[in-house]
Amino acid sequence: MTTTALITGANKGIGHEVARLLSERGITAIVGARDEERGRAAAGRLGLPYVRIDVTDEASVAAAAKWIEAEYGSLDILVNNAGIAGGLDGGVPSAAGAQAFRDVYETNVFGVVTVTNAMLPLLRRSPAGRIVNMSSELGSISLALTPGSPFWGLNFAVYNSSKTALNMITVCYAKELMDTSIKVNAANPGYCATDLNGHTGFRTAEQGAAVAVRLATLDADGPTGAYLEDDGPIAW
Ligand code: NAP
């Protein structure tokens, strides 16, 4: 039986590496990308299928779900990876304004809900559905409140709170799906050099992808409703 995965924002960065690493495990990793040219180029490089999906566009998400259903009949793994930073530097709340929150939440929060709800009927047909939400250590309220931690000074209200919201959404889905075989977890990839941060990260995109791959391929004993990084759980 084919194991299928959809990775949003897989044309570059961490999502690209998640798709590549899942395909190395024999999984049919569908490269989801909003731009057809960039998406098809990445899928071609990886030898994987492509589907157009803009997580902020409900019609494109619905069309992607329809295409996956027609092509594969079900979906085993959903990696909600697509995300934007929204200009981290101007992120203190007084400088940001409500529109900056709306813009980032459209992708990082509402987009995840749109995609998850559209794919859930397909994931329910899988014997072991897995949903991985690409969070961030910047979404951890505990780390943000730890004086002396590197996160104390990274007071990016817009981006950070979008990932905090994503963490709670992860928990809510996990609880809703507790009685099913679907597991829902949040991954912290760490600070990786990608376009998102002008390649300032000290980890590679491949290193960042590893935890998502682990959560995407959890066995039946694995956690649900967890927030994990390479070394294990991260404080909420
Ligand atoms: P990236 O290289 O900028 O990649 C982001 C991906 O998301 C791109 O493929 C982008 O597509 C896609 N995307 C953005 N908006 C989209 C939309 N509306 N619909 C579909 N795709 C969309 O960034 P990255 O570092 O790999 O980030 C991947 C995820 O990891 C994000 O959720 C990010 O918040 C998270 N993360 C990253 C780091 C880090 O240090 N890099 C740390 C913690 C968490 P386009 O190419 O079309 O723009």
Image (spheres, helix red, strand yellow):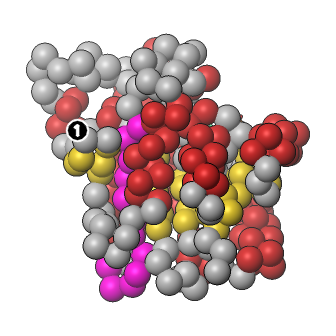
Residue 78 position by quadrant: bottom right
Question: Does any portion of residue 35 appear in the rendered image?
Answer: no
Which residue is most to the left? Answer: 147
User: Which of 226/142 is in front?
Assistant: 226
Residue wearing tag 1: 141
- Residue 149, compared with residue 228, is above or below; it is above
Kindly identify the amino acid type of the residue bearing the numbered disc 1: Ile
User: Which of 10/53 is in front?
Assistant: 10
- Residue 40, compared with residue 6, is above or below; it is above
Which residue is most to the right? Answer: 37
Pinpoint residue 106: horizontal percent, then vertical percent.
Answer: 58, 46
Pinpoint residue 51: horizontal percent, then vertical percent.
Answer: 78, 57
Looking at the rendering, the stretch of residues picked out in magenta corresponds to 178-189
- Residue 46, compared with residue 99, is above or below; it is below
User: Which of 140/29 is in front?
Assistant: 29
Residue 140 position by quadrant: top left
Question: Does any portion of residue 178 appear in the rendered image?
Answer: yes
**Left or right placement of residue 152 versus residue 7 in this view:** left
Residue 120 position by quadrant: bottom right
Q: Quadrant of the N terminus?
A: bottom right
Q: Ligand 1 is located in which of the four quadrants?
A: top right
Q: Tell me the element at label 1.
A: helix
Count the marks.
Answer: 1
Residue 184 covered by magenta stretch: yes
